[in-house]
Amino acid sequence: MREGCVLDRLAALGVDTVASLPCDRTRDLCALIPERFHAVNLTREEDGVGICAGLAMAGGRPVLHMQSSGLGNSLNAIMSLTVTFGLPLPILASWRGVYREAIPAQVPFNRAVPEVLAALGIPFTIIRDPGDEELIDTVVRDAYDAMRPHVGLILPSFWEGEEACLPERVFPSRARESALAYRRTFRDPVMTRYDAIRVIAAALDGEAVVANIGVPSKELYAANDRDLNFYMLGSYTQATPIGLGIGLATDRDVVVLDGDGSLLGTAVLPVVAEQAPENLTIVCLDNGAFGSTGNQPTPASGLVDMELLALAAGIRKTCKVQDEKELKEAWESRGRGPTFIHVVLKPGNAKVPNIPLTPGEIRERFVRALGR
């Protein structure tokens, strides 16, 4: 069975995790992935970029699998995270829109994928038929040897001529009771994001920390620079995916300093709940604003309750804090997770300098400190 041969190749290359959002043309491959690898089932392709970045920095060896249309959702994360920090990212993409394609919506973007990748300088390899199977090795090896993304575009013709003999899929029962008694009162905020970051920074003791893009990373650097801090320089919405990836590949406690705007823009919270890493704490620094771009209000400003959003996503250990005393108590009592600490803040940025580190320096010292 060709799907099994592909997975054999990945295993022989040392792959240990496959983050995947399925395609109809690779449904049999998707069905087999959990039997051979740690499977991270995505709900948004670009979250896989961040998850694979975290896994790779913590010593894992992931592969990202998606439909080629998902590359369109992922290009900024690939360029601003994978390329900027020099991280490996092998992508196996089911290439739609060019071979016996019956869905018109698959054509406009997907037929231009090679030109798009070439324009961005992202290496790619076209895998057309079973005789090209060894090219999968090329994709994975080059990504890890050259520390860069490499996309394998797998045409549907690659899977033709062989019927997979898979057992009928058995779905677990969905019968359950969903009950929630929830009542919270929002007070007028007294802390800024920098106040909250300084409380957490003073309490850090061996945790790996991922700080959200823009001012939050600069504020953490000013409060307590340490090798175990990963400062993001771009990649909107990818802080929690990176932290999830790190948490899955290490026993070390991992803390994500994320924001309400970033978390409202991602689909990763259900993935966190499903993977359930006990060493992961997400601190949602909710100032109701896009703080790094001028403090424009987010829907969390007076509408969305970020703690309730985390609960709805399936994260069971949550709390809301609204002053320094409550934050210290929540931090000290957080225990095993995944834990979601919702910190209600007022808008405003501290006047702190830029981080005087290159992306490569941030990555290298962080990876060394993780103890890989």
Image (cartoon, grey):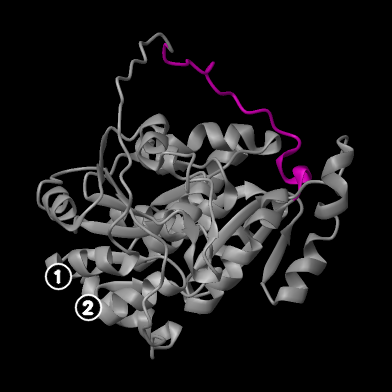
The residue at 18%/58% (across/down) is 324
Asked if labels 2 and 1 touch by Cβ distance under 8 angstroms, the answer is yes
Q: Number of marks in the image?
A: 2
The residue at 34%/81% (across/down) is 364
Where is residue 317 drawn, in percent x and y? 24, 36
* Label whose residue precedes the other's in the sequence (1 or 2): 1
The answer to whether residue 213 is above or below residue 92 is below
Q: Nearer the viewer, residue 109 or 165?
A: 109
What secondary structure do most residues of the magenta stretch adopt? loop
- Magenta-drawn segment: 155-173
Q: Is residue 173 left or right of residue 31?
A: left
Q: Nearer the viewer, residue 79 or 308?
A: 308
Quadrant assignment, res 132: bottom right
User: Is 222 within the magenta?
Assistant: no
Q: Of all residues shown, which one is farthest toward the front? A: 188
On residue 202, the disc is: 1
Local crowd at mark 2 within 10 Å, few (<14), some, or many (≥20)? some
The residue at 15%/53% (across/down) is 331
Q: Quadrant of the N terminus?
A: top right
Which three-letter amino acid code belongs to the residue tagged 2?
A: Asn
On residue 224, the disc is: 2
Q: Secondary structure at mark 1?
A: helix
Where is residue 187 drawn, in percent x and y? 30, 45
Q: Secondary structure at mark 2?
A: helix
Q: Quadrant of the C terminus?
A: bottom left
Local crowd at mark 1 within 10 Å, few (<14), some, or many (≥20)? few
Which three-letter amino acid code belongs to the residue tagged 1?
A: Ala
Q: Could you tell me if residue 243 is visible in this image?
A: yes
Q: Could you tell me if residue 227 is visible in this image?
A: no
Where is residue 336 drawn, in percent x and y? 16, 43
The answer to whether residue 116 is above or below residue 288 is below
Where is residue 136 drawn, in percent x and y? 60, 58
